[in-house]
Amino acid sequence: MRRLLLLTSAVVLVDTMFFSAITPLLPTYVERFDLSKAGAGVLSGSYAAGAVLGTLPSGWLAVRAGSRRTLLLGLSLMAVSSVGFAFAGSVMLLDLMRFVDGIGGACAWAGGMGWLVSVTPAAQRGTTIGKAMSAALAGVLLGPVLGAVAQAVGPEVPFSLVGLFAASLAVVALRMPVAAGGSGLDVVDRPYVTAWRERRVRLGAWLVMVPALVFGTVEVLAPLALDDLGASGLTIGAVFLVAAGIEGVAQVFAGRATDRVGRAAPIRLGLGGTLAFLLVVTVPDAAWLLAAVVVVGCVLSGIVNTPAMTLMSDGVEGAGLEHGLGFAIVNLVWGGGQVVGSVVGAGLAGATSDVVPYLLLALVCAGTLAGLRGRSAALAPSATAPVREVA
């Protein structure tokens, strides 16, 4: 299980690294291609759009072909798209490569995380997901550094190295043993419909989407706002670097708390903090102060993800379905939230002001917090379940 955790952590690291590298590069591409805020939102959100499109096929593939094959396909797409992004000479090609990488990320996420959680005892699920999410945040941490380096020396070498890393992970996955004896679960007709009937799946999906909406908006508006206040691309990258580093540590503790005290406490803490962040993010008029607010807001919003994904895993297992299918649903709702946050949030800000999308998101957080009342049973810790062994 330890080897599989290391592999899965490396997979989500390289995926999120490519995804987040756009943050410090965004002002450069806006200037180079004369993009509007909406155009910047499309470039930023094209990865999430690909993740959404790849969601249903990746879940189906994980069930029918197995987690490892799904993971291998995802890593192959990630390798190709990273190199393509490195040498792209137009904004349309940049959008396309991020879109393809989103599809690859959907397959890699469903295959890798589904494979990992399927061999993890239910009582340790939150901790395991928290560790994997910490690795994902390490990728988010390294992504802005990658973007800043690409801004300084050109994208060809940095993004080609990311593609090489993804290809090497595919070789490692190919050499690892698969679970013996299959999943032990019956094949269910219309598995997505079956999963959606489970209350914990629906609630977990919504709780994954809310932080995605927030981050999708922040990753477009915050870099542009920081740029307007005089921050350099390196400084913008450093802001998200610090946020990811702190959040990576916070995810581990959130995972442990999820296993020990249930899903409710870390979810409420994260949502409450995110609500406060959204109400004050447009107030700072100095780059350093806005940077501090963005760091705190990103950390608090990210805390929600680990207990939300753990809750969804509980529901998928309760419905008798493969865990890979559950993480495919995670990709769907997360990607959908990213697309809406990046494109719609940026479009609203361009038509009105940044205050409008932030206030709408604050209302979403407040409504979600209110809706969690009376759901203590669904948010309770999961009972220990048998674990499938790895050959």
Image (tube, helix red, strand yellow):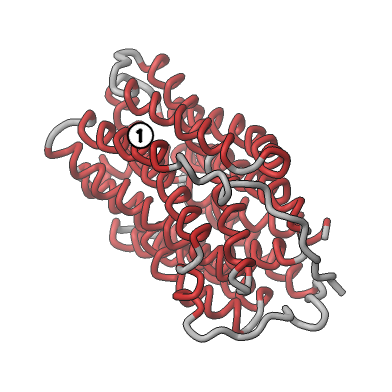
Report the label total: 1
Res 285 visible: yes
Give the residue at x 28% y 48%. Answer: 41
Give the residue at x 45% y 42%. Answer: 372
| Residue that mark 1 sits on | 366
Residue 315 drawn at (x, y percent): 58, 62
What amino acid does circle 1 point to? Ala
Q: In which quarter of the image is the C terminus?
A: bottom right
* Rendered image quadrant of residue 54: bottom left
* Rendered image quadrant of residue 99: bottom left
Residue that sits furthest to the right in the current view: 391
Establish if 57 lies above or below 26.
below
* Rendered image quadrant of residue 151: top left
Residue 290 drawn at (x, y percent): 38, 20
Secondary structure type for disc 1:
helix
Mark 1, other Cα within 10 Å: few <14 / some 14–19 / many ≥20: some
Establish if 271 lies above or below 77.
above
Residue 373 drawn at (x, y percent): 45, 39
Establish if 166 lies above or below 252.
below
Give the residue at x 30% y 51%. Answer: 340
Give the residue at x 84% y 71%. Answer: 390
Residue 108 drawn at (x, y percent): 59, 66
Q: In which quarter of the image is the N terminus?
A: bottom right
> In this orientation, which residue lies closer to the viewer: 92 or 184?
184
Residue that sits furthest to the left in the current view: 351
